[in-house]
Image: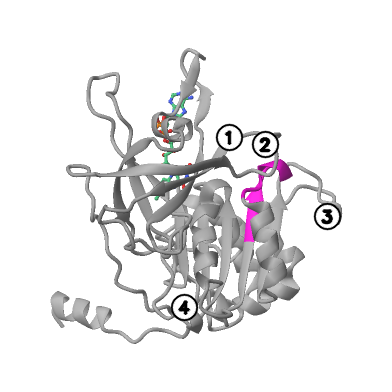
Amino acid sequence: MTNAASRREGSARAASPGEPVMPEVEQHLLTPASPGVGRVVETRPCTAGRKAAGFVRHICIDVSGTPLAGRFRPGQSFGVIPPGLTERGKPHKLRLYSIASPSRGEDGAGQTLSTTVKRTIDEHWDDHTLFLGVASNYLCDLKEGDEVAITGPAGKRFVLPADTGAHDYVFFATGTGIAPFRAMLLELFGTEGPATSRVALVMGAPYATDLLYHDELSELAERHENFTYLTAISRERDAAEGKGLYVQDRLRTHAGELTPMLDSDRTIVYICGIAGMELGILQAMGRALDPARLSQYLTLADEAPTDPLQWDRRMIPRTLRPTRRVLMEVY
Ligand SMILES: Cc1cc2nc3c(=O)[nH]c(=O)nc-3n(C[C@H](O)[C@H](O)[C@H](O)COP(=O)(O)OP(=O)(O)OC[C@H]3O[C@@H](n4cnc5c(N)ncnc54)[C@H](O)[C@@H]3O)c2cc1C
């Protein structure tokens, strides 16, 4: 068989059980060469109180009159081009931000989209002066009515499947990784009657004060018995466990709820947030699932250690290759 023939055969293979069929989505309707102009219509902190260690804002932008209006999907991102020049006199490059709104937008008509922005604040590594990230601080400083140059939408893999009702979902988020899941949850539990899917969200944060959209998500879970909302706080002592917990620990502490979901042919796993979080989740899945079930989420190369504790991040994606039932966006 020629290479071309084998490639064709590869792309035409039948989907394995539970493998999602992804929709065609539009991308790059607005580009850096010809961005659109959005207008901030709302900006508010999305942590519960003022005691959070970081500063994270829910920022809602009116995109009406731009090609983005009505044409973005949960899981996609949009670009922001900060004004001004870099130290080298070049225009700033765009930064991507996940869309936190369902496709109907925040206004129900797809004319406004929101995102969840964390201010990047640090000390310079070399001279310990204050380091402020360009785009995140620009966005968080904007006031209602201010204009912002936008591009997008971007991303076609990290979206909900074409037939959302054919699947159940386990979402793992850390930090602003919650943004696409807020969008997906509002899409799934939208205005068109009760969702038939089961959905579990595990949200990780260092301290309880850093949880994002906590009240909104708690209310959603109260209203929908098929939505389970779990938190994992890493730097506070969990009363039952006597130590801090990471998102993957919920696969053990809530095995009764989560393992049957992962054991189902319907389930897709989504991971979004801090780069590195995926390893712990894959390891915990490796411990929770029998090899046949695990293989539907993760293809292990021959040289992969059998003990998940011996896996490391550099093994992803060659030695540990997530299947199409694991979707990741880490940054
Ligand atoms: C697909 C995708 C979706 C994303 N979604 C979101 C989202 O929803 N919300 C969100 O907040 N972010 C999101 N991000 C991240 C976002 O794009 C930006 O990278 C982030 O906001 C930082 O941008 P900035 O311009 O503020 O920082 P920058 O000015 O770009 O500064 C950060 C850079 O500076 C360097 N740096 C960091 N600290 C120091 C230091 N102490 N001294 C010297 N250099 C340093 C780092 O190398 C880093 O590359 C997403 C990224 C991707 C790829």
Q: Position of residue 273 (x, y in %)?
A: 52, 50
Q: Position of residue 301 (x, y in %)?
A: 44, 67
- Does the magenta portion include 120? no
Counting residues from the N terminus, which is met first, the one under dot 4 or under dot 3?
4
Q: Which residue is mark 4?
A: 164
Counting residues from the N terminus, which is met first, the one under dot 4 or under dot 1?
1
Q: Position of residue 296 (x, y in %)?
A: 50, 77
| Mark 2 or 3: the one toward you | 2
Q: Are marks 4 and 1 in contact (CB under 8 Å)?
A: no
Q: Which mark is residue 241?
A: 3
In this rendering, is residue 247 above or below 261? above
Q: Are marks 2 and 3 in contact (CB under 8 Å)?
A: no
Q: Are marks 1 and 2 in contact (CB under 8 Å)?
A: yes
Q: Which mark is residue 55?
A: 1
At label 2, the amino acid type is Ala
At label 1, the amino acid type is Phe
Counting residues from the N terminus, which is met first, the one under dot 3 or under dot 1?
1
Residue at disc 1, secondary structure: loop
Task: Write down the region rendered in magenta.
Answer: 202-212
| Mark 3 or 1: the one toward you | 1
Residue at disc 4, secondary structure: helix
Residue at disc 2, secondary structure: loop
